[in-house]
Every structure is written in structure tokens, then in C-alpha cells.
């Protein structure tokens, strides 16, 4: 029963040892490779417990990021219009050093494409603006900030607008190219039915 393996992996992902979660997600995926939630849960666990994943799989940190991204992409192939999954994938790029700006922007544009309503779209605009500002794409960042009208995003829009104005006023016009920061991806692991 792949759902039982997924749910057991969820338990170990929350309570430890997390290495059991890795093995049990793999078992769930082996039994039902067509269930996207198993891949999504596995990806989130690998991303959040990078150090454990590095030891368990004998991978470098960059290889662990690649493993998490690959699992998210595998899940998204199975559930192409899942906005939460698309944003989980896109948010993973905030943790990767050196940044992978073009891949991050591509992932956020995909999330924008599958956004279900204006609130989701405006949330994506926030992330696009962050990445564009950090890459010196100030006009694009301004356009995305201008498209944010929902009061839910007023505080973050104000902060980003001030940051953008400071970058526009700096002698170089672009400020630094530091990777933007945001919360880690994903909600808690999802139980299978």
C-alpha cells in the first residue's frame, strides 16, 4: 500500500529519524510512481533536511538541491496545474547558492501560468519582483510591483517598492545582485488517501 508508506514517511519526517522518511518515500514512489504527492513530500523533506540527505545519499549540497528539484519536477509532470506544487518548486531556488536566477524566474513564471486567481497571481508577482530586482531587471520588477493591488500584499509591496527605489537611485542603477530571500518551500507533508 503506497499510501501507508507515504504516511509512515510523513511521521518520520516530523518525528525522526528523517532517514526513515527518505527510504519510505522511495518505497511509496516505487509502488505508485504516478502519485505526485509522494514526490512532493519527498522533495520537501530532502530540501528541508539537506544535511541529513547529504549524509544519507552521499551527495554534495548542490546535488541535494538537484535531487529536491528533480522530485518537484517529477511531481509537477504528474500534476501540471497544481499551484502549490509549482510554488514549492519555485521557492526551492531561494536556498540555492550560488543562485540559479534564470531557473528561478522560469519556475515563477510557470507558477504564474497555473495560478488560479488574482491573489495567487499577485503573490507570484512579489517573487518575480524580488528575483528581477536582485538581477538588476528593475523595469520588470517595477511592472510586477505595479500589478499588485490586493491589500493582502500591501506591506511587502511597500518594502519592495522602497528597495527598488533605492536600487534605482544608486550610482550603478542596480545595486547588488544578491539572491533574494523568502520562506522555505511547502506546507507540511500531505497524507495520501
Image (cartoon, helix red, strand yellow):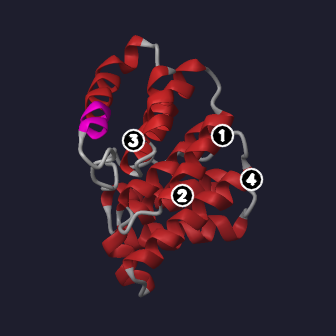
Where disc 1 sits, the SS reads loop
Judging by the rendered image, the residue that carries numbered circle 4 is: 78
| Crowd around label 1: few <14 · some 14–19 · many ≥20 (10 Å) | some
Q: Is 156 located above or below residue 167 in the figure?
A: above
SS label for mark 2: helix
Per the model, the C-alpha gap separating discs 4 and 2 is: 23 Å
The residue indicated by pointer 2 is 102
Q: Are marks 4 and 2 in contact (CB under 8 Å)?
A: no
Which residues fall within the magenta stretch?
A: 164-169
Q: Quadrant of residue 50?
A: bottom left
- Density class for disc 4 (Cα within 10 Å; few <14, some 14-19, many ≥20) is some
Q: Residue at x 51, y 74 (%)?
A: 23
Where residue 39 sits in the image (x, y, percent)? 60, 59
* Rendered view: 24 above or below 112: below
* Image quadrant containing the C terminus: top right
**Mark 4: which secondary structure?**
helix
Give the Cα distance between marks 3 and 4. 29 Å
- What's the CA distance linking mark 3 and mark 2? 13 Å
How far is disc 3 from disc 1 in space, using C-alphas? 22 Å
Q: Residue at label 3? A: 130
Which residue is more in the foreground, 163 or 33? 163
Kindly indicate whether the residue at mark 4 contacts the one at mark 1 (C-beta within 8 angstroms): no
Q: Is residue 167 magenta?
A: yes
Whether the residues at callouts 3 and 1 have beta carbons within 8 Å, the answer is no
| Residue 133 visible here | yes
**Residue 161 on the magenta segment:** no
- First in residue order: circle 3 vs circle 1: 1
Label 3 crowding class (10 Å Cα cut-off): few <14, some 14-19, many 20+? many
Amino acid at each position: 500500500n503506497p499510501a501507508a508508506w507515504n504516511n509512515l514517511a510523513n511521521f518520520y519526517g516530523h518525528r525522526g529519524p528523517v532517514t526513515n522518511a527518505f527510504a519510505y518515500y522511495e518505497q511509496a514512489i516505487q509502488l505508485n510512481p504516478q502519485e505526485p504527492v509522494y514526490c512532493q513530500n519527498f522533495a520537501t523533506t530532502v530540501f528541508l533536511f539537506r544535511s541529513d540527505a547529504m549524509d544519507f545519499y552521499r551527495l554534495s549540497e548542490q546535488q541535494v538541491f538537484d535531487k529536491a528539484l528533480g522530485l518537484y519536477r517529477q511531481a509537477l509532470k504528474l500534476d501540471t496545474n497544481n499551484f502549490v506544487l509549482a510554488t514549492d518548486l519555485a521557492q526551492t531556488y531561494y536556498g540555492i547558492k550560488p543562485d540559479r536566477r534564470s531557473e528561478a524566474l522560469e519556475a515563477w513564471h510557470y507558477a504564474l501560468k497555473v495560478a488560479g486567481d488574482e491573489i495567487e497571481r499577485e503573490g507570484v508577482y512579489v517573487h518575480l519582483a524580488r528575483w528581477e530586482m536582485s538581477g538588476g531587471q528593475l523595469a520588470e520588477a517595477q511592472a510586477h510591483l505595479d500589478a499588485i493591488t490586493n491589500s493582502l500584499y500591501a506591506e511587502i509591496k511597500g518594502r519592495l517598492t522602497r528597495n527598488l527605489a533605492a536600487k534605482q537611485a544608486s550610482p550603478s542603477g542596480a545595486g547588488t545582485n544578491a539572491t533574494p530571500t523568502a520562506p522555505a518551500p511547502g506546507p507540511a507533508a500531505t497524507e495520501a488517501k
